[in-house]
Amino acid sequence: MRRYDPRATMGILAAVSCIVWPAIGQGRAVVDMAGQSVAVPGHPARIADLWFAHNAVTIMLGAAGRIVVTNDRPTTRPWMYRVAPDLYRAAGVMGAVPNVEMLRHAGVDVAFVSSGSPALEPMRRIGLPVVQVGFTNEASLRRAVALTAEVLGDPRAHEIAGRYVAKLDAMRDRVAAAVADIP
């Protein structure tokens, strides 16, 4: 009778998880803006950015070339394609829920969606790391920028995020000083 070896079982589970989606089992865990822990690759090279407002954050943090799937189109956001021409190489998604096979074919490492997106569950079912982001005020914008830099796993993204927050603080202070005497 053979003895049970838990290491063998864990090895099989790890191998199967990498077949389901290659990024699983690699990298680190982050907590998204919905409070969910998500295992993301250490340095995701291929991003699906599926919340229209978040594409600008990813571009600002220097990762435009990593966006391989987007829901922003040149006809709806021409300025974005002018600022980040790498987006012309990204596959465009129409509708709220992308075709998961298209995401698999694009080799997506991680996806960003708005909090509560209907695309969340279909992508999670196939094992794609999905990070929920969103912002409605300055505090949540700051958190979204910091979280995105963390997911990107890039020191340059962290540096840009820090500079952005510093400029945001300076602008807020400047406006506060300018209106301080207004009743």
Image (spheres, rainbow, N blue to C red):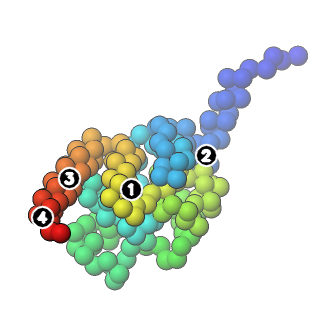
Query: Which residue in the structure is indicated by mark 3?
Result: 169
Q: Amino acid at mark 2?
A: Ile
Image-based side of 155 in relation to 118, left or right: left
- Disc 3 marks which amino acid? Asp
Question: What's the residue at 36%, 62% (across, down)?
Answer: 137
Q: Mark 2 packing: few (<14 Cα in 10 Å), some, or many (20+)?
A: few
Q: Amino acid at mark 4?
A: Asp
Q: Residue at x 41, y 40 (%)?
A: 42
**Residue 88 at x, y = what percent?**
32, 71
Foreground: disc 2 or disc 1: 1
Q: Label 4 belongs to which residue? A: 181
* Mark found first going from the N terminus, 4 or 3: 3
- The quarter of the picture where the C terminus appears is bottom left
Asked if residue 92 is positioned above or below residue 42 in the image, the reply reads below
Q: Give me the C-alpha separation between circle 2 and circle 1.
A: 35 Å
Q: Position of residue 83 (x, y in %)?
A: 22, 69
SS label for mark 4: loop
**Eye-nearest disc, 1 or 4:** 4
